[in-house]
Every structure is written in C-alpha cells, then in structure tokens.
Amino acid sequence: MSSLALTLVLAHLGLSAVLVADLLLRRKEPTSTMAWLQAIVFFPFLGSALYLLIGAGSLHRRRYRRRRKRLGPLETGKAARDGAAARAAQLNGFAADAVMLATATSRRSPTHGNTLQIFDNVSRVYDDIEAEVWRARDHVHFEYYLLEPDATGRRFLDLLEAKAREGVEVRLLVDGVGSRNLTGEHLRPLVRAGGQVGWFLPLRVFQRLQSLHLRNHRKIVVIDGRLAFTGGVNIGDAYRGRRARRAHWRDTHLKVEGPAVHHLQEVFAEDWWFATETKLTDDRYFPPLATAGDALIHVVASGPDDPARAIHTTLFHAIATAHHRVWIATPYFVPDTPIMAALETTARRGVDVRLLIPDRSDHPLVDRAGESYLPALLEAGARVYRYEAGMLHSKLVAIDGRWGTLGSANMDIRSFRLNFEVNLIALSVEITGQIEAIFERDLRQSRPVLPAELSIRPVHRRLTVAACRLLAPVL
C-alpha cells in the first residue's frame, strides 16, 4: 500500500471515529443512527461530508441556554408552569391538557386578552404591515426567512430605511440561506440610515458547516412592542403572484394585539441575541399592554435547539386526542412516524380527518416524497384534497372547532426538527371557526385524491416517489 493510500485510510478511520462518537452521543432514532453510521463508515469522506452538512440536526444547546438566561425578562420555567396551571384551572378536559402540554414544551404560558386578525390575502398582509410600520414611534423588528431584493423586497427595505432616518430603532434579521440573494449593496442604505441587520447562521466558508441545513423559518414583525405579525408569508414578488408560472399564491398570516405580543418579542429577542450577541432587555421593548380582546393565545416556538420539539408535540397531542374533526392545510406534507401514526389512528376512530395540499408545490421532490404517505392515509379513512387554484402555502390546523394553530411550521420533518419555527395556538371557538371557514373556502377550489389515482401510477413514478421518500428527513 502506498504512503498516500495509507494516509487516506488512516484519515478516514480517524474522521469516522470522531463522527461516529458524535452520532452516538446525539441519541438519534435507531434507524437514523444506523443509516448515518453506514454512510460514514462505508462511503469514505463522502459520508462524513454529508453528515457534517446535514446530519447533525441540532445546535450547541449549552451555549444557547447560557444566552437565554442572560436575556433578562424571559419567562422562567416555573413562572410559565404556574401561569399555565392558573389558566388550566379555568378550563377543562382537552383544553386544560393542551395548555399544560404546550407550556411544558414551549416554556411559555398562554395569555388571555388578545385579538387575532387572520389574513388570507398576501397583498392585504403587506399593506397592513406597511401601514403599521409607518405608525411606529420607538422600534421596528423584522425577522424573515426569505426577503427577496425584488420590487416587493426593496419597497420594504426602503420603508425600514425611512423609519431609521426618523430615529426609530430598526432591526432586520434574515436567514443566511433563505435570504441569500440579499447583498451588502441592498442593505447598505438601511445600515447608513442607522438600521441594524443580523444574519441567522450566515453562509461562511469553513464555519458552521454542520448547521447548513438548520434554518430560521420564522416570520415575525413586532412594532413598538404593542402589536405583531407572524405566519407563513415571506417577502417577495412571488407571494403577490407576480410570477406568471404561479399567478396565485395562497397564504395565511396573523396580526396580534395583546399580551401575546410580548412572547413574539421574546422569540425575536432570543434570535437577535443568537445572531448578533446583542441583548434586547430594556423595558420599552416590553411596554405594559392593555387587554385587547378575549382570545387565549399560546405562542409556541421550536427549533433544533429544542429537545421537547414543542410544535411537533402539541400537534401530535391535538391530533391524537381529537373527537370530531382534524383539518390540516400544508404546502409540504412529509410527516414523521408519530404524526403519521396519529393521523391514521385518529381517522380509523371515525374522526373526520382532512388534508389539503397543493396540486403542485414549488418543491417537486417534496411533492413526490409526500405522495408516498397518501395511500396509507386514504386507506385509514382520511380524505385528501389537492388545491388547484395556485400555490397553497397556507399552514393551518383546526381541531374539533375549538383548537386552532397557524404559523410558520409546515407538516414536515424539516419544520419539526431542523427549522426554527413559531406557531400561535388559539383555544377559541371563534378563531378556530375562522380557520375552518378559510379551510372550507380553499376546499371549494380543490379536488379529492382518490385511491385509484395513486394505484395506477406508472412504475417510473412509483420508483421516483419511493426514492424521494428516502430523502424525507432533509427535504
């Protein structure tokens, strides 16, 4: 054996030993662990490179916890539990259980006295955000997975620049992958005007390679600490339907007023600290808020730094304990084993389980992977529909007419385990009724998926679907 070959073998063995130890310590699911172990050992360097890029699945938790503790006004675990217990005592049955579970996993208690406005039209969302930003007097916080430097994106950048010139504190936090088209040239006017820009896990050579696939998928706007927006709408021309290939983009977004705004501000503060190491603990970011309505709202954030998987856990509980109906709209349906089992079991109990997905999304591989789960759902008695009026990007779930959630999380493994997400849970008959009404309107522009449609697929289509399912954990 030549000296070069020997060197490569020793390097492979040494690297493999380190990565296998890391893999075992992460305590992944046994099937995932075995798959990565084989890739690392039997595919020299290639398997190791893939593991470093997409296999880690978490951030350094100890460092993140230390930063959380230094933020100051964030709610402690005990305070959250005490607040949740007080709320649960006023509820009963499913609602009380849902409050306690969401609190235990998210470390935030629900808040009463909120109003929630649901938008199902992207242009109206943009118009309302723009109007509220113009009214800002102290600070504007923008956090987006994707902000494109096109006409729509530049309009918002110009707006933020104008507010910064007025003396308003402006902070823009964008994801390093989702907003990769943004450049220093696009952001320079905002910075010169006094605005601040943060990059969440930016793309840098030889830095954080293991976090390349861990993305901040949240969309949050907080204005003066008094109102907030969140949901599924990014910023760009495509979302207004300005691309001929997808003229209609169906999405859902939320406007919140009341105590829940402080919890969205906390989520932004955590992310800003992680990205910039700058604390936002001044009381003026969390001003006293009067009761704005009567909605009980729970802000649930999760990410690869969250071992409790708060959004995943609350969804699993809501689906598994439903008695009458489970209605889900999602652009990408790639569930993990627990969520799939909950959906099948609930459907077999006779619960009205309906899934609404796009007829064709903007990610063909995800479409194929998701298709592999549909036969089992249909066999269990669930009903599946494909939205035909455009690109369905709405993410909503309604359970039994009394529990509803909307936010940034898709019904897929990436949102459950790899992305930083934020959802709002509403324990409200009125708000859940609005979510169901939106679902029913979208259903009228959809067609049912029949078992025969899936069973007569040609061999090459079935092979493609099966192959894409293998990629499900990272799609």
Image (spheres, helix red, strand yellow):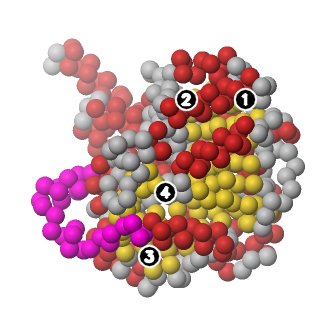
Marks 4 and 3: in contact by CB < 8 Å? no
Which of the two marks, 3 or 4, is nearer to us in this view? 4
Closer to us: 352 or 305: 352
Quadrant placement of the N terminus: top left
Q: Earlier in the sequence, mark 1 or mark 2?
A: 2
- Give amino acid for label 1: Lys
Name the secondary structure under disc 1.
Answer: helix
- Badge 3 or badge 1: first in the primary sequence: 1
**Do callouts 1 and 4 mark residues in contact (Cβ within 8 Å)?**
no
Q: Nearer the viewer, residue 475 or 329?
A: 329
Query: Which residue lies at the image location 77% right of the left edge and 38% below the top edge?
Result: 136
Q: In the image, is 149 to the left or to the right of 187?
A: left
Q: Nearer the viewer, residue 182 or 208?
A: 182
Classify 391 as above or below 177.
Answer: below
Q: Residue at x 78, y 44 (%)?
A: 225
Q: Nearer the viewer, mark 3 or mark 1?
A: 1
Residue extending farthest left: 459
- Determine the CA span between mark 2 and mark 4: 24 Å
* Element type at mark 4: loop
Disc on res. 154: 2
Q: Which residues are magenta?
A: 443-471
Q: Bin the neighbour count of mark 1 within 10 Å (Cα to Cα): few under 14, some 14-19, many 20 and up.
A: many
Question: Whole-Å distance between the Cαs marked 3 and 4?
Answer: 17 Å
Can residue 329 be seen by looking at this rendering? yes
**Of circles 1 and 4, which is in front?**
1
Pointer 2 or 4: first along the chain: 2
Instruction: Please state which amino acid type lies under the numbered disc 3.
Output: Val
Badge 4 is on which residue?
394
On the image, numbered disc 1 is attached to which residue?
A: 163
Residues marked 3 and 1 touching at CB (< 8 Å): no
Report if the CB atoms under discs 3 and 2 are less than 8 Å apart.
no
Q: Could you tell me how far apart the alpha carbons at marks 3 and 2 are, in whole angstroms?
A: 41 Å
